Amino acid sequence: MLSLISLLTVLFFSVSSCQQENLRPSHLNRYRTSKPTTTTTTPTTTPPPVVVTSNGTYKISAPISLTGVSNLTISGDSIEGGTVPCITLTNCTNIHINHCKLFNSTTTGVNLSNCVNISVDSSYISNVSSGVYATNCQTIQVVGNQMKNMMGPFPRGQFVQFNTCSGAGNSVINNKLENIMGSSNPEDAISMYMTNGTAASPVIISGNWIRGGGPSTSGGGIMLGDSGGSYQVAENNILVNPGQYGMAVSGGNNMQVLNNQIYAVKNTFTNVGIYVYNQATTGCSVIIVSGNIVNWTNSAGVSNPSWDDGNCGTISGWSNNTWGAAITSSILPAVITSL
């Protein structure tokens, strides 16, 4: 009897021991197979600061410099240039600069080199050496901008200068341009330097409002054929006190000065309203000057609306201008820029 009881006791403890051992793996495996909890966060970016002006809202940007870029729009940027151009494009194509505010650069607002099909429109450019300066470019369009106070010094000081540009589709149209005496140091307001359009598509300079120039004794309003060039048309522009001269053809061939209004009061630097005088080493021919209305007083206080040096051949339309016209500075509104 005792031996039976002892046997039952041994069996009971053996079964209990096996049941307890079988619990442990199940209990431990539950924790071994569970995955740790992870938390993911979405990175955040801080939007660029903005500036709100009477001309709109802009995002503050560092100066932009691009090389070999195509098919891009630069829009809504406020860029203070400092010692570099606000925007520099080199070997770029199909770039649109729109509604930008470019200012305070000891060099240019927009500097273009070896570029094709670049447009600068609806932008505000001020207190730079030159506004838009294009070298060896094609199809450059400067349209509907406001620019104020070009700071030079020479050879800069233009609102717009095309330097050895060529081909079809180049234009400077419907810009409002103003230099304030004592706050600027300009040369020519618009200069076409050794630039060639085509017979079918000449360089067009049209509908621009230009006020203010001097004290440079060489700079002035709109210069065609600067050191040569061809197929350029300046038409329907209005200029008030633009500097030493109003409009000029200083070389080249197939130049047209049509239906512009030009006015200046006496100043220490004023010379002549419109002149044609070949200063280039190349020839000068096929020049048309017609339909212009000019009232210009030179530094001696004498009316001096026009001068033809005679070294560009016969000027077509010369007798179809109104020299000494009864116009005043009111040909432009009192305020032309909102800068």
Image (spheres, helix red, strand yellow):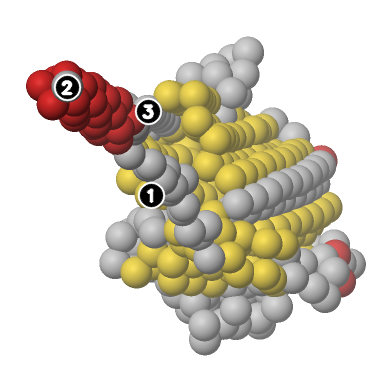
**Mark seen at residue 69:** 3
Amino acid at circle 2? Met
Sequence-wise, the earlier of marks 3 and 2 is: 2
For this view, does 162 lie left or right of residue 316? left
For this view, does 116 lie left or right of residue 99? left
| Up/down of 88 relative to 261, above or below | above
For this view, does 146 lie left or right of residue 226? right
Q: Position of residue 57 (x, y in %)?
A: 67, 62
Residue at image point 29% right, 67% down: 83
Q: Secondary structure at mark 1?
A: strand
Q: Please, which residue is most extreme toward the bottom here?
A: 182
Amino acid at circle 1? Ile
- The answer to which image quadrant residue 205 occupies is top right
Q: How much space separates mark 3 and mark 1, taking CA atoms?
A: 12 Å
Q: Which residue is mark 2?
A: 1
Q: Which residue is mark 1?
A: 64
| Up/down of 173 relative to 178, above or below | above
